[in-house]
């Protein structure tokens, strides 16, 4: 009975094909939460597929209905060995984005895992079925090797993450006692490199809104009215130009941090990044001057134009249009409150004579909270040391993901330090056709997680603190 034996057991399950067989069963369930009519598949994943997967592991499983009608349920599996021991809340999401089957390469099916060399293709192989399967199979390996975990574990798999986790916050609030824990550990997202482990400590938040200039109900003949009727397209363009400089620096007061916190800056400065062929390179001349690419992505605010339209671009007419609109998205760190983004923009536009430009917030899927666990948190140090022990090198510690996730809900509702351990890479085609996992990262992830679970059960975790909410 040893740590190395638990790691070897977890990776043996990969080598003998057991992990692949289980992943195929998970991927075969078309859990497309973005599509109407997906509820039966989401429910089957929670009520049948996951309970069958975890049989014999000593977990009590249940399916919790989503507080929001018509939204996917949440699977919860609990193993309490001793209330005095630390409790780990293990997170995953069982829903996926649209399969987009016609757009996949020849011979590939989003609902079947196709192995081509080191690439395992299929929807959910990395986002997120393959990753929460790593966590579960590593738990299984430690149980088999030690006979117990040595800690308490709650596995939570939601089915709405690709829709912004609707209903999850309400569920966490209602089930606070059931889900009480000492730490949140989730497996999701890509790593900065394929050759070293990684920890992420939250996410940037996102706020989307429409800018609308509506001057009249109809368009009017350009020859008769051009030059005498205000043009909403130009008004909107000038308003948008006031938000950033021609080099992309944000000009709206209140949108950017006063400074990047020292612990966050240290973590960013230590990051190792691996260039991925075929992906664009960052332009050092765009954005906040004086910041590195890492600081811009993980420590600063960004704003982009998602869409912009006036008139009918597919069939332009000779007319002064009555309306112009654009949708913008701001990504911000935990140093900026998401609720302050739109009011700050309103003040900014009014001060520059753009009172007629409406700012209309976009709710639900296009708004998500920012979060960050302190890089100096004892749990972060413990997890980093465990991963280094297994991998032979220290992990990247990313202060917050550049993408979105529900970290803020678990921090705010359960009071937990949030730690993500991703096992994918930037070229995985996540959310697009030909999504795939890299087999070496899956195998390595099983070993990393088995080592981590072993260390927590060996008493290396920080002192128990319970639910701090």
Image (cartoon, helix red, strand yellow):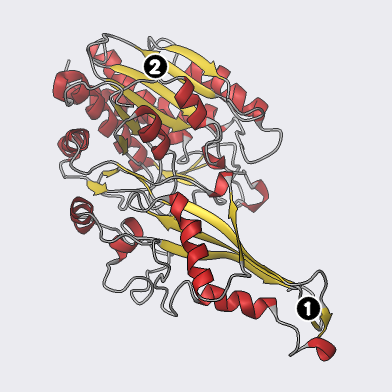
Pointers 2 and 1 in contact (C-beta within 8 Å): no
Q: Within 10 angstroms of label 1, few (less than 14), some, or many (20 or more) residues?
A: few
Q: Position of residue 66 (x, y in %)?
A: 58, 25
In the image shown, does 17 or 252 lie closer to the viewer?
252
Who's the residue at 49% across and 75% down the image? 242
**Is residue 466 in view?**
yes
Q: Which mark is residue 316?
A: 1
330 to 430, vertically: above or below: below
Q: Position of residue 69 (x, y in %)?
A: 65, 27
Q: Position of residue 312 (x, y in %)?
A: 76, 72
- Label 2: state its secondary structure: loop
Residue identifier under label 2: 177
Upstream in the sequence, badge 2 or badge 1? Answer: 2
Who's the residue at 61% across and 51% down the image? 104
Q: Position of residue 263 (x, y in %)?
A: 19, 50
Q: Within 10 angstroms of label 2, few (less than 14), some, or many (20 or more) residues?
A: few
Who's the residue at 15% across and 20% down the image? 459
**Is residue 13 in view?**
no
Figure quadrant of the N terminus = top left
In the image shown, does 267 or 386 lie closer to the viewer?
267
Q: Which mark is residue 378?
A: none
- Label 1: state its secondary structure: loop
In the image shown, does 331 or 143 lie closer to the viewer?
331
- What is the spatial separation of the Cα atoms under label 2 and label 1, in whole angstroms? 59 Å
In the image shown, does 274 or 302 lie closer to the viewer?
302
Q: Quadrant of residue 34?
A: top right
Tell me if 197 is positioned left or right of 327 in this view: left
Tell me if 254 is positioned left or right of 161 in this view: left
Figure quadrant of the C terminus = top left
196 to 212, vertically: above or below: above
Who's the residue at 32% across and 39% down the image? 421
């Amino acid at each position: 009975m040893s740590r190395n034996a638990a790691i070897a057991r977890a990776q043996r399950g990969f080598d003998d094909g057991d992990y692949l067989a289980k992943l195929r069963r998970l991927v075969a369930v078309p859990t497309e939460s973005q599509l109407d009519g997906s509820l039966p598949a989401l429910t089957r994943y929670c009520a049948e597929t996951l309970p069958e997967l975890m049989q014999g592991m000593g977990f009590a499983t249940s399916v919790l209905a989503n507080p929001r009608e018509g939204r996917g349920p949440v699977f919860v599996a609990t193993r309490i060995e001793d209330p005095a021991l630390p409790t780990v809340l293990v997170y995953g999401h069982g829903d996926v984005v649209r399969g987009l089957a016609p757009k996949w390469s020849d011979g590939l099916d989003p609902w079947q895992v196709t192995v081509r060399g080191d690439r395992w293709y299929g929807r959910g192989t990395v986002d997120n079925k393959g990753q929460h399967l790593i966590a579960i199979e590593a738990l299984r390996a430690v149980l088999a090797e030690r006979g117990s975990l040595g800690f308490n574990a709650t596995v939570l798999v939601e089915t709405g993450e690709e829709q912004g986790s609707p209903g999850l916050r309400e569920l966490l609030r209602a089930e606070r006692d059931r889900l009480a824990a000492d730490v949140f550990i989730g497996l999701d997202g890509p790593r900065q490199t394929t050759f070293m482990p990684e920890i992420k400590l939250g996410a940037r938040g996102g706020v989307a809104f429409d800018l609308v200039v509506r001057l009249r109900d109809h368009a009017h003949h350009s020859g008769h009215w051009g030059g005498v009727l205000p043009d909403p397209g130009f008004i909107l363009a000038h308003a948008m130009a006031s938000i950033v400089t021609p080099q992309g620096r944000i000009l709206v007061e209140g949108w950017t941090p006063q400074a990047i916190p020292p612990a966050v800056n240290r973590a960013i400065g230590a990051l190792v990044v691996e260039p991925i062929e075929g992906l664009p390179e960052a332009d050092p001349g765009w954005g906040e001057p004086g910041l590195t690419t890492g600081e811009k992505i993980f420590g600063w605010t960004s704003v982009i134009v998602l869409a912009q339209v006036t008139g009918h671009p597919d069939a332009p007419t000779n007319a002064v249009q009555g309306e112009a609109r654009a949708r913008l998205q701001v990504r911000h760190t935990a140093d900026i409150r998401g609720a302050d983004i739109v009011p700050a923009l309103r003040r900014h536009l009014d001060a520059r004579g753009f009172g007629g430009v409406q700012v209309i917030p976009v709710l639900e899927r296009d708004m998500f909270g920012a979060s960050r666990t302190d890089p100096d948190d004892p749990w972060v140090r413990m997890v980093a040391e465990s991963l280094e022990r297994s991998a032979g090198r220290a992990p990247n510690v990313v202060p917050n993901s550049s993408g979105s996730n529900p970290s803020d809900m678990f921090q705010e509702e359960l009071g937990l330090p949030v730690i993500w351990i991703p096992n994918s890479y930037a070229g995985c085609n996540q959310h697009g056709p030909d999504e795939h996992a890299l087999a070496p990262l899956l195998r390595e992830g099983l070993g990393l997680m088995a080592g981590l679970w072993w260390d927590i059960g060996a008493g290396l975790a920080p002192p128990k603190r319970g639910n701090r909410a």
